[in-house]
Amino acid sequence: MSSSRPVPTDPMGAPPRPRRSLVVSVLIGVAVMAAVDEIVFHQVLHWHHFYDRSTLGVGLLSDGLLHTGELLALVAGFFLFADLRRRRALSAAHAWAGFFLGLGVFQLFDGIVDHKLLRLHQVRYGVDVTPYDWAWNVTGLVLLLIGAALTVRAGRRAARDRSTA
C-alpha cells in the first residue's frame, strides 16, 4: 500500500486549476499593460492616442474605449482570480506566469499589429520611431519570455508534485 498525499481541494471538492489560473492571469496581465499604455503614453506623455488617423476627438474617443475595455477586463479578471482563491484552486506559480504572458502579449500585439500592420498609431510622433519601436517590442518580448519560462517552471513543479503525491 503506497502512502500518497491527497490533492488539496476546497470544501466543495474542486481540485487546483493550474490552466485556469494561467488564463485568468493572462487576462489580468493584458489589462494591466493596457492600463500602463493608456495612462503613461496616452495621458501623461501625450505621445499618441489609440487611433491617431483622424481628429483629436476621435483619438480621445478611441482612448476612452480602450480604457473601458481595459477596466472591464481587469474587473472580470480579478473576479475570476478571487473565485479561484475562494475555492482554493489557485496555482500561484501558474498565475504569475500568466500575468507576465499577458503583459508581453499586449505589448507585442500593440507594437506589431497596432503600430506596424494596422498603423493605428505610432509610439511617438515627430522623432525617429526606430529606437522607440525596438524598445517597445523588445520589452514585450522579454515579458513574454519571462512568462514562458515561468510557465515551464510551474508545469515542471506541478508534475513533480503530482509524481510525489
Image: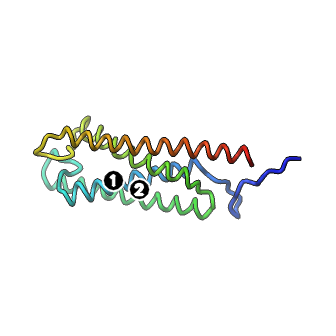
For image coordinates 56% across by 55% down, the residue present is 92
The residue type indicated by label 2 comes to: Ala
How many marks the image carries: the answer is 2
Classify mark 2: helix, strand or loop: helix
In space, the residues marked 1 and 2 are separated at their CA atoms by 10 Å
User: From the viewer's perspective, is residue 72 above or below residue 148?
Assistant: below
Q: Disc number at residue 58?
A: none
Location of residue 133 by image quarter: top left
Q: In x, y percent, where is residue 16?
A: 64, 53
Observer-nearest of 114 and 153: 153
Mark 2 or mark 1, which is nearer the start of the sequence? 1
Q: Which residue is mark 2?
A: 73
For image coordinates 35% across by 55% down, the residue present is 69
> On the rendered structure, is 11 left or right of 41?
right
Toward the right, the furthest residue is 1
> On the rendered structure, is 30 left or right of 135?
right
The residue type indicated by label 1 comes to: Ala
Mark 2 crowdedness (10 Å alpha carbons): few <14, some 14-19, many ≥20: many
Location of residue 53 by image quarter: top left
Q: In x, y percent, where is residue 63?
A: 24, 55
Q: In x, y percent, where is residue 116?
A: 24, 36
Contact (Cβ within 8 Å) of mark 1 with mark 2: yes
Q: Disc number at residue 34?
A: 1
Mark 1 crowdedness (10 Å alpha carbons): few <14, some 14-19, many ≥20: many
Q: In x, y percent, where is residue 85?
A: 58, 62
Toward the left, the furthest residue is 126
Observer-nearest of 122 and 156: 156
Classify mark 1: helix, strand or loop: helix
